[in-house]
């Protein structure tokens, strides 16, 4: 077989393997619902990273498999050594320059996505989150309630408004993670950490502690309810009449989640 023909076959096989890889990576449903503007940006970044990685994976694995097949040791060759090859400047420049350009491009794009996701908007509401072994509780400050602060075990946020979560821990390090928003941050005793998201899809989504924080870690879960701004105001009003955290909120919240 001529060398040109072998290269053509290798390229065609590589393209087919890449196409199969990309199709497989999309057929499998990896992610929960996208419920924030940040989630869309993060998922697009993920797709770009996957599509960029698959041809490289195919190339590297192809070279490995070809070498194992073509250059394997045959019986009687146990004591032989490989040919003495000393470097190939052109090849080395090539395999340094291409990954450098690729990595700088992807790192730059990731930075832009992270920067956009963390950008502070003109208007934003604040909710304090407290983690402790093994539960989450939420404090809605006076600026938000228009009266006394509200302390609750329920997390309600209005759709379409940027929310900054200020994270506090009473004991050990936790991580406040809303998979549907694609964001998490460590919750560290002694300091306040933050993250922000703009919910853009009505519904109820899991809140998960994502750092092993003790025996009850797997039970440290909660729910975030994304409701319309008017339903959010109604929920706040229903909480104002109750001074005990969590009490009465179950009944008030039942009609607004969905
Ligand atoms: Cu935990």
Image (cartoon, rainbow, N blue to C red):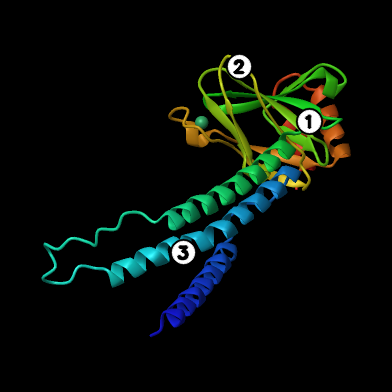
Q: List x then y, in percent, for residue 101.
A: 58, 50
Quadrant in which the N terminus is drawn: bottom left
Dot label at residue 30: none
**Does residue 254 appear in the picture of this structure?**
no
Comparing 161 with 234, the one in front is 161
Is the Cβ of the residue at disc 2 closer than 8 Å to that at disc 3? no
Dot label at residue 120: 1
Quarter assignment of residue 3: bottom left
Up/down of 114 relative to 242, above or below = below
Q: Neighbour class for label 2 at 10 Å: few (<14), some, many (≥20)?
A: few
Q: Mark 2 vs ligand 1: CB under 8 Å?
A: no
Comparing 42 with 154, the one in front is 42
123 horizontally vs 212: left or right: right
Q: Secondary structure at mark 3?
A: helix
Q: Which mark sits nearer the N-terminus, 2 or 1?
A: 1
Q: Which mark sits nearer the N-terminus, 3 or 1?
A: 3
Up/down of 195 relative to 180, above or below = above
Q: Which mark sits nearer the N-terminus, 2 or 3?
A: 3
Could you give the CA–CA distance between mark 2 and mark 3, rounded to whole angstroms?
A: 46 Å
Quarter assignment of residue 127: top right
Q: Of circles 2 and 1, which is in front? A: 1
Quarter assignment of residue 89: bottom left
| Residue drawn at 54 percent across, 27 percent down | 174
**Does residue 45 appear in the picture of this structure?**
yes
Dot 3 corresponds to which residue?
Answer: 59
Q: Mark 3 vs ligand 1: CB under 8 Å?
A: no
Q: Of circles 3 and 1, which is in front? A: 3
Q: Residue furthest bottom?
A: 1
Dot 2 corresponds to which residue?
Answer: 191
């Amino acid at each position: 077989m001529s060398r040109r023909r072998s290269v053509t076959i290798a390229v065609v096989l590589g393209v087919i393997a890449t196409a199969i890889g990309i199709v497989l990576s999309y057929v499998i449903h990896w992610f929960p619902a996208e419920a924030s503007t940040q989630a869309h940006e993060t998922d697009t970044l993920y797709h770009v990273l996957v599509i960029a990685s698959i041809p490289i994976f195919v190339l590297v694995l192809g070279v490995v498999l070809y070498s194992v097949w073509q250059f394997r040791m045959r019986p009687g060759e146990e004591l032989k050594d490989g040919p003495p090859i000393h470097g190939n400047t052109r090849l080395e420049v090539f395999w340094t320059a291409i990954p450098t350009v690729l990595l700088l491009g992807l790192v730059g794009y990731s930075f832009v996505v992270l920067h956009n996701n963390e950008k502070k908007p003109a208007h934003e509401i604040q909710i304090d989150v407290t983690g402790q072994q093994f539960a989450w509780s939420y404090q809605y400050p006076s600026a938000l309630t228009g009266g006394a602060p509200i302390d609750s075990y329920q997390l309600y946020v209005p759709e379409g408004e940027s929310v900054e979560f200020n994270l506090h821990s009473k004991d050990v390090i936790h991580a406040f993670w809303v998979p549907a928003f694609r964001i998490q941050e460590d919750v560290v005793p002694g300091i306040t950490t933050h993250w922000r998201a703009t919910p853009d899809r009505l519904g109820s989504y899991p809140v998960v502690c994502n750092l092993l924080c003790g025996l009850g870690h797997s039970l440290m879960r909660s729910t975030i309810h994304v409701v319309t701004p008017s339903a959010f105001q109604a929920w706040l009003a229903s909480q104002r009449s109750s001074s005990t955290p969590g009490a009465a909120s179950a009944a008030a919240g039942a009609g607004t989640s969905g």
